[in-house]
Amino acid sequence: MSFLFRFYIYFIDIWKNIRTMPFYHKLGKIPHKRHTIFKKPDGGLYYEQLFGTIGFDGMSSNLYHVHRPTQVKEIKSSYDVSPKIAIENNIKSYRFHGFKTTPEDDFLESRKTVLHNSDCSITLAAPRQSTKDYFYKNADADELLFIHKGKGKLRTQFGNLNFKYGDYLLVPRGVIYKIDFETSDNRLFIVESRRPIYTPKRYRNHFGQLLEHSPFCERDIRQPYELETNDEKGDFLIKVRKQDRIFDMVYATHPFDVVGYDGYNYPYAFSIHDFEPITGRVHQPPPVHQTFETDAFVVCSFCPRLYDYHPEAIPAPYNHSNIDSDEVLYYVDGDFMSRNDIEAGHISLHPAGIPHGPHPGAAERSIGKTETEELAVMVDTFKPLQVTEEGMKIADDSYHKSWLE
Ligand SMILES: [Fe+2]
């Protein structure tokens, strides 16, 4: 192998590594070496499971189970959960009234996909109750759950994460979970991604550490704690989402039977309130708000911050043509400076191909203001989004004319 080729491979390796969530985590008991004898107190073996992504090339964790994680007892019925598309080719700006989605008792039934493409789905959920009778696993997509209203605990085989208003919960595909709510008035904004979700690589050094100019650091990322090890046999229903169907699979042992694990692939939490906004003398573009990235879309957090401090700055954004990406904004709290008649729970869709910008009067209103309390989550997708039938139920059909003077 030539020196130059080795050099090339070395940098490809570095590039791969900085595209991970490079944050080693260990919880519970693990053996000193991978793939070696790890005995239970009764002399039997714990069962090792490599939980990896991108073949054997992406992030992975090694888990140690009390029972084999492969004990399928029965595959019951399956049912279709693919989003029903109402508008396949869209060029119209929309506003959706997110809080008009009807609450449902069940977590999965409450999930209503409003926007969709082959890379991601944007889903609203208003579950009233915790998941009780089943476990859930999304085998198609990483899930980013933003907690707009509600408080509780995400339970997984990697340990638990407490959540409350403002938390992003990142659940990598394949993680088995339950969600326990202490509250009944819950509102979630969910992005399902068929590409792995990472934090932006430009904020990481070659070793994966978050750099000083990053708007968040390792201390802001909450890792799972409270590993639950259930040594139980019986009938355990896991609802597995795969290829837009839910398969009801019955396993013979409790899915949360892990005594320990280590690695880089696990669910974690990050609060939008811990995002430190980057500001400037003049208007800063959306990438300064970027929080997560994939190959197919980005997620940004618009947080309360000081406004631009050039004496003649216009803090409201300029008109812009997102020629090659659809822009979705989910309004969480505060007065959103660039829009009229926007409330918490609203979603705006500004599709690729046409310019959009502040509503009439918004730029003028913003001049001289020193700060904003706006709080919003933005998803910019590189492929066009389709509007679903669920989306059309809560759509404001006249929003696209809201810039007329
Ligand atoms: Fe925009």
Image (cartoon, rainbow, N blue to C red):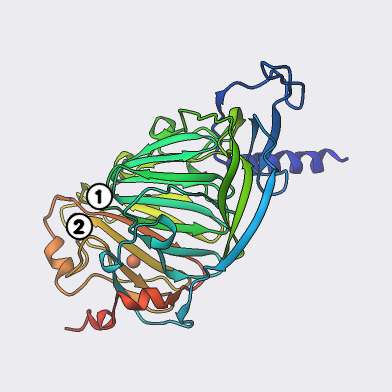
Q: Residue 246's image quarter? A: bottom right
Q: Is residue 313 left or right of residue 391?
A: left
Q: Residue at x 65, y 29 (%)?
A: 66
2 and 1 marks in contact (CB < 8 Å): yes
Name the one closer to the observer, 399 or 389. Answer: 389
Estimate the spatial distance between the alpha carbons at disc 2 and disc 1, rounded to whole Å.
7 Å
- Which residue is labeled 1 in the image? 281
- The quadrant the C terminus occupies is bottom left
**Quadrant of the frame with the N terminus:** top right
Tag 2's secondary structure? loop
Foreground residue, 37 or 264? 37
For the residue carrying disc 1, how many other residues have a C-alpha within 10 Å: few (<14), some (14-19), or many (20+)? some
Rendering coords of residue 71 (x, y %):
69, 43
Residue in the image at 60% along x and 21% along y: 29
Q: Is residue 399 visible?
A: yes
Q: Would you place residue 64 above or below residue 122 in this image?
A: above
Pointer 2: residues within 10 angstroms few (<14), some, or many (20+)? some
Q: Which residue is mark 2?
A: 313
Q: Residue at x 42, y 45 (%)?
A: 179
Q: Amino acid at mark 2?
A: Ala
| Rendering coords of residue 323 (x, y %) | 45, 73
When the figure is inspected, residue 380 is found, relative to residue 303, above or below; the finding is below
First along the sequence among labels 2 and 1: 1
Direction from residue 165 to residue 206 in the image, left or right? right
Q: Is residue 305 left or right of residue 226?
A: left
Residue farthest along the front direction in this orientation: 234
Question: In the rendering, at what x and y percent does residue 22 appear?
Answer: 56, 35
Tag 1's secondary structure?
loop
